[in-house]
Amino acid sequence: LQALNLGIEVVNTTYHLRFSKDCGRSLLRMWYCSHCQGLLMARPCAGYCNAVIQGCLTSVVEIDGYWREYIRSVERLTKGMHGMYDMEHVLLNLFSLIHDAVIHVQKNGGKLSSTINKLCSHAK
């Protein structure tokens, strides 16, 4: 759950990032640079590509740590969701779990009511 909350925060932060007009112009110029397009046999302008990327992404560096933590959190989450915690397993067994709970309430209704009354009366 924490991974998903962190993801929402990171995406919201990223969504609101804006690049300057100069950066936009530089990115457009870079698009037409043959070396930046991967045509490595053409005369290189790699220095220009690197300068533009570094210049445009300096404001984005501040969220790099958050992105990395988000990725680590999602990886931990997916590793933990195996076996009985696997989402598919949980959803496929949901009907059975609800059915078992209803049967339990029907069998133990009186006992549950008295327990709930005791707990609720202490809370007041």
Image: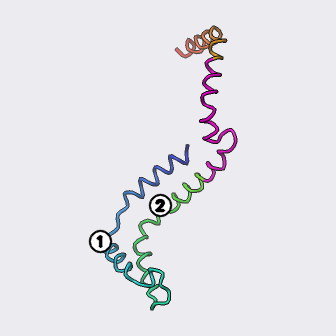
| Quarter assignment of residue 33 | bottom left
Q: Which residue is mark 2?
A: 63
What stretch of residues is rendered in magenta? 75-102
Q: Secondary structure at mark 1?
A: helix
As drawn, the residue found furthest toward the bottom would be: 43
Please report whichever mark, 2 or 1, sits nearer to the chain's N-terminal start: 1
Tell me what residue is drawn at x 55 percent, y 43 percent: 1
Tell me what residue is drawn at x 49 percent, y 90 percent: 41
Q: Residues within 10 Å of mark 1 (few under 14, many from 20)?
A: few
User: Is residue 65 among the parts visible in the rendering?
Assistant: yes
x, y (%) of residue 12? 41, 53
- Is 67 included in the stretch rendered in magenta? no
On the picture, is 2 further left or further right than 97? left
Q: Mark 2 and mark 1: span between their CA atoms?
A: 21 Å
Q: Secondary structure at mark 2?
A: helix
Do labels 2 and 1 touch, CB within 8 Å? no
Which of 66/90 is in front? Answer: 90
Q: Residues within 10 Å of mark 2 (few under 14, many from 20)?
A: some
| Quarter assignment of residue 103 | top right
x, y (%) of residue 53? 43, 75
- Is 91 included in the stretch rendered in magenta? yes
Mark 1: amino acid? Lys
Tally of numbered discs: 2
Reply above or below: 16 against 36: above
Tell me what residue is drawn at x 38 percent, y 61 percent: 17
Q: Which residue is mark 1?
A: 21
| Most common secondary structure along the magenta stretch | helix
User: Is residue 50 among the parts visible in the rendering?
Assistant: no
Mark 2: amino acid? Ile
